[in-house]
Amino acid sequence: MGPIPAGLEKFYQQRPDWQRCGTNQECATIQVPLDYTKPAGQTIELRARKVLAKDRGGRIGTLFINPGGPGASGQEFAAQAPMLFGLPVLRKFDVIGWDPRGVGESTPVKCLDTAQLDAMIAADGSPDNAAEIADLDKQSKTFAAGCEQRSGRLLPHVNTKDAARDIDVLRGIVGDPQLYYLGMSYGTYLGATYAEEFPKNVGRMVLDGAVDPAITSEQMGIEQAKGFDKALDAFAEDCAQRSCKLGSSKEEVLAKVDQLIKDSDEHPLPGDGQRQVTQALVILGMVYPLYLKDFWPRLEDAVAAGLSGDGSPLLALADEYTDRKPTGYADNSNEVQIAVNCSDRPDATSIAQIKAEIPKFKAASPRFGEFMAWSSVSCANWPVKPTNTPHPIKAAGAKPIMVLGTTRDPATPYEWAVGLAHELESGVLVTRDGDGHTAYLSGNACVKNVVESYLVQGNTPAADIKC
């Protein structure tokens, strides 16, 4: 199992009660310390789901998986693994997905009720006057106060470093001497942080849709805004080449999109009868389908409907993005995302600072820059000081780590994967030329083969690979 950090024996040596919870699947609740500096103090729960390896006799170990977010459910990801992952992986590994600390069915961060969260998500993300700025600030303060009131003890301990320490407890519990791990999007930052904390415990690690740990929050926001612009360009070009409802040239399509963004700022669209579709919801409804090329036709239809005065398709896309169901939010991912991001890295500390940064954001992305700049208002009012500062992660002494990047990834721009692969002492870069977010599950056979050959056989490419 490998060495156990002093004082944590009872956590590493616990025997979870794995109960059947689906075909070939088992679920359990695991205890971890709330505060790793006080292991004898309060504990919190992690809820995990295990998909049993098909080849019981020939299993290699346990592959731990994380879908990103921060805030996405690893349990749900594991439940879908039999449909998503390649047979070589499913044969040779038990696959475990868990809800990280603060998330879902683990001890959760709670902040707002449905109506409050609706108001925060729909608030004007590109305020034009003092009243709109004051409203955005008020929403952010309500959120921070709600989190502190309902989850005060948890907030200082939902950072990524603590979540990475949880992974090592999980590795110890299953008895693997080294960690097998596949993390996507934010899950790459979690994986890289693990490699920094426990370099000797890294076995085989795939980081797909990489976050670059060396960049600041401001750089991250600017690069993401550019990434969504780039993805929207690709959508517009693709649309124009087909019989597109929005125009016969890329410029025409983009002009329609911009018109809708501009018009919805002054005149929200009718939505589902209860909620209006504000400019913020229009933006969310446009950004979400850029994650997956298969959703581009839905984006075309939703923009066309919006231009003709019907906001419901855009609202439906925004709701999918934020996990909003007819009865309320399906999970706490919106809350966790802010809680973890504000804990992990310093961000804007005041309205004045955000205002000062806007010209830089707008220059990088006239369409999305301002929204990205104002999104940091949540951290400006956050009650907990960040525990980390952006820095390159070397993970000196770790075995080879595979980093995957997609050339037109809107959410985690390709440059971040290049950055992480170069920072890691043992990083190997696999490039997927394509659209959408992440690479392994994109249907690219070359990426699939490279990843599965590495995970199952331990075949590390001698040099960076292009797919």
Image (spheres, helix red, strand yellow):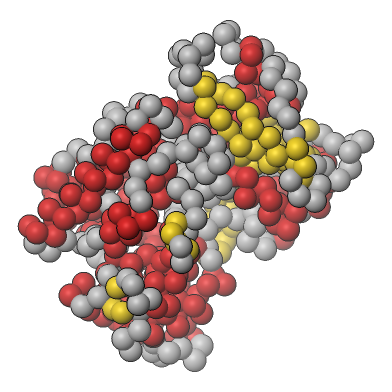
The x and y percentages for residue 351 are 14, 46
Q: Which residue is drawn at the image coordinates 55% and 41% (left, top)?
A: 105
Whether residue 420 can be seen here:
no
Point out the image quarter for the C terminus.
bottom right
The x and y percentages for residue 114 are 37, 56
Point out the image quarter for the N terminus.
top right
Specify whether 25 is left or right of 314: right
The x and y percentages for residue 423 are 48, 34
Q: Which residue is drawn at the image coordinates 62% and 50% (left, top)?
A: 76
Which residue is most to the left?
130
Specify whether 139 is left or right of 243: left
Q: Quadrant of residue 353?
A: top left
Q: Which residue is drawn at the image coordinates 35% and 36% (left, top)?
A: 150
Specify whether 18 is left or right of 356: right
The x and y percentages for residue 184 are 56, 47
Q: Give whichever of 277, 241 is nearer the camera.
A: 277
Q: Is residue 80 above or below residue 268?
A: above
Q: Quadrant of residue 228?
A: bottom left
Whether residue 57 can be seen here:
yes
Q: Which residue is drawn at the image coordinates 40% and 41% (left, top)?
A: 110
Q: Give whichever of 283, 112 is nearer the camera.
A: 112
